[in-house]
């Protein structure tokens, strides 16, 4: 019975409307411009001012869906930004944003379960989904 109550709480929390962007929780584009554009470029194509100083060029983030069979890899994107999911060939130049404060958490339903996700991480990943070419 205890498990049903917990799962019911997650299901209800997943229905809560996302907070509107405020000074405390900027929108995804603003987060991208402040934290990612210097390397990935304002167009997210990997041509930022700092890109030429890196050993490995930043990827074109507008092609994430295309490289994943037409489906935006939301969980992989969030894990990469956070720093949890990075392969051995991943550039160490990209900061692990999960080591800092990514704001309050919101519950997002994934695979039928509610997962707490930092709101700024979610907003940034949703912005990247919007810019897919």
Image (spheres, grey):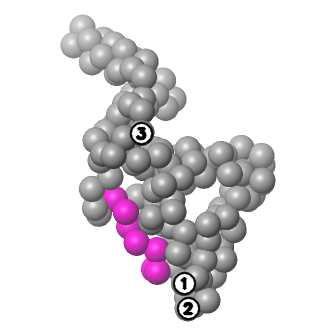
Crowding near the residue tagged with mark 2, few <14, some 14–19, many ≥20 C-alpha atoms within 10 Å: few
Quarter of the figure that contains the N terminus? top left
Residue 44 % position (x, y): 64, 64
Q: Residue furthest front?
A: 23
User: Does the stretch in magenta take in 97?
Assistant: yes
Q: Are marks 1 and 2 in contact (CB under 8 Å)?
A: yes
Q: Which residues are magenta?
A: 92-98
Residue 21 % position (x, y): 42, 39
Residue drawn at (69%, 68%), measured in percent from left and top? 45
Tell me the number on the disc at residue 53: 2
Q: Which secondary structure class fits the magenta region best?
A: loop
The Cα–Cα distance between marks 3 and 2, rounded to whole angstroms, is 33 Å
Q: Secondary structure at mark 2?
A: helix
Left or right placement of residue 41 versus residue 28 in this view: right
Q: Are marks 3 and 2 in contact (CB under 8 Å)?
A: no
Q: Nearer the viewer, mark 3 or mark 1?
A: 3
Q: Are marks 3 and 1 in contact (CB under 8 Å)?
A: no
Disc on the earlier residue, 3 or 2: 3
- In the picture of the structure, the residue carrying the numbered disc 1 is 50
- In the picture of the structure, the residue carrying the numbered disc 3 is 21
The Cα–Cα distance between marks 1 and 2, rounded to whole angstroms, is 5 Å
Q: Is residue 80 visible?
A: no
């Amino acid at each position: 019975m205890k498990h049903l109550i917990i799962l019911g709480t997650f299901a209800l929390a997943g229905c809560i409307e996302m907070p509107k962007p405020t000074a405390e929780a900027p929108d995804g584009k603003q987060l991208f411009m402040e934290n990612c554009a210097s390397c990935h470029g304002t167009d997210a194509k990997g041509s930022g001012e700092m890109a030429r100083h890196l050993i490995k060029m930043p990827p074109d983030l507008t092609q994430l869906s295309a490289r994943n069979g037409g489906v935006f890899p939301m969980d992989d994107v969030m894990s990469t930004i956070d720093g949890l999911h990075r392969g051995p060939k991943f550039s160490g130049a990209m900061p692990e944003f999960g080591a800092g404060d990514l704001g309050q958490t919101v519950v997002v339903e994934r695979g039928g379960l509610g997962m707490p996700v930092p709101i700024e991480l979610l907003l940034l990943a949703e912005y990247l989904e919007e810019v897919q070419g």
